[in-house]
Amino acid sequence: MAGGRPPGFVETPQPCRYHIAMRSTPPREPADPSTVIVSRGQISRRVAELAQEIASDCGPQELTVVAILDGALIFLADLVRRLPMPLVLVTVGVRSYRGRAVTAGPLEVHRGIHTDLAGRRVLIVDDIYDTGATLAAVMERVARHGPNSCRTCVLLRKRRDDEPAGPRPDFVGFDIPDVFVVGYGLDYDGRYRNLPDVVALKRSEEGTS
Ligand code: 5GP
Ligand code: MG
């Protein structure tokens, strides 16, 4: 199996949906143009549209945005600056991918919601919707506060064959193929969040080098 691999490659120790082989020091740019799933231009245009959709649906009253970090960080920053209504920002820290994993492990809320959301109009913002488990878990925590309303928004939604675990998001930026993506806030082992495009992490059989 390992025959023919260039020196310096390490493999993810656990079985995973996407067989990743990467350099022990990952390249600064894992992407070539063919792996771009959503470009920075497409993101910028769609974020502006999403903000308009949210504004017309949620109205001019104050909105409390509950952002799921760390992945939503960059999307959040772009989105909230385009929202016209008065706004309160609350963050929640959720983790389901650990280290070099590209399949989800158990969901861990490592920083909960410390603001009272009773009676508020809430918008939950996340980077990507895959099985729906993360959004469902945060929605459940928000619901315990008794908000006036709760909407959900994700930048990306994966096209999957199976039914999602939770309710579908109200606002979706892009439907994308079921591949592991990084960039624009999304990471692999803590890296690549700063890439301006959303790109597919290369599969070893596609010849990572
Ligand atoms: P879900 O709970 O819907 O299955 O997964 C949602 C969470 O898993 C996202 O908030 C994100 O943190 C992570 N996730 C799902 N798919 C990907 C992916 O392709 N790339 C990255 N970097 N994270 C993902
Ligand atoms: Mg996330």
Image (cartoon, rainbow, N blue to C red):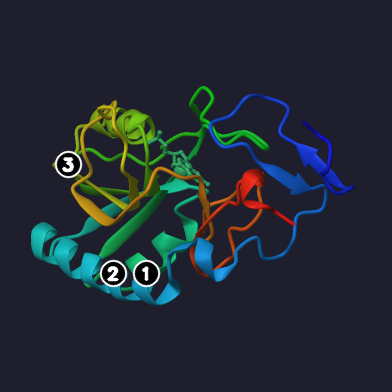
Q: CA distance from mark 1 to mark 2?
A: 5 Å
Amino acid found under the numbered disc labelled 3: Gly
Q: Quadrant of the N terminus?
A: top right
Picture quarter with the C terminus: bottom right
Q: Earlier in the sequence, mark 1 or mark 3?
A: 1
**Mark 1–mark 3 contact, CB under 8 Å?**
no
Position of residue 29 measured from the top left corner of the image (x, y, whole percent): 67, 65
Residue at screen point 80% across, 40% down: 10
Label 2, label 3: how far apart the Cα atoms are = 30 Å
Q: Which of labels 2 and 3 is toward the front?
A: 2
Residue ID for mark 2:
46
Residue 184 in view (yes/no): no
Report if the CB atoms under discs 1 and 2 are less than 8 Å apart: yes
Q: Label 3, on which residue?
A: 119
Q: Secondary structure at mark 2?
A: helix
Q: Residue 188 in the image: x percent, y percent?
A: 62, 47
User: Dot 1 lies on which element?
Assistant: helix
Is 103 drawn above or below residue 92 in the view shown? above
Q: Is residue 137 left or right of residue 21?
A: left
Q: Can the viewer see residue 90 in this picture?
A: yes
**Picture residue at 58% right of the left edge, 29% below the top:** 16
**Amino acid under disc 2:** Arg
Mark 2 near ligand 1 (CB under 8 Å)?
Answer: no
Q: Residue at x 18, y 48 (%)?
A: 170
Residue at the spot x=29%, y=32% of the render?
161
Task: Tell me where residue 56 appears, x and y as whole percent.
Answer: 10, 65
Amino acid at the residue labelled 1: Ile
User: Which label number is shown at residue 43?
Assistant: 1
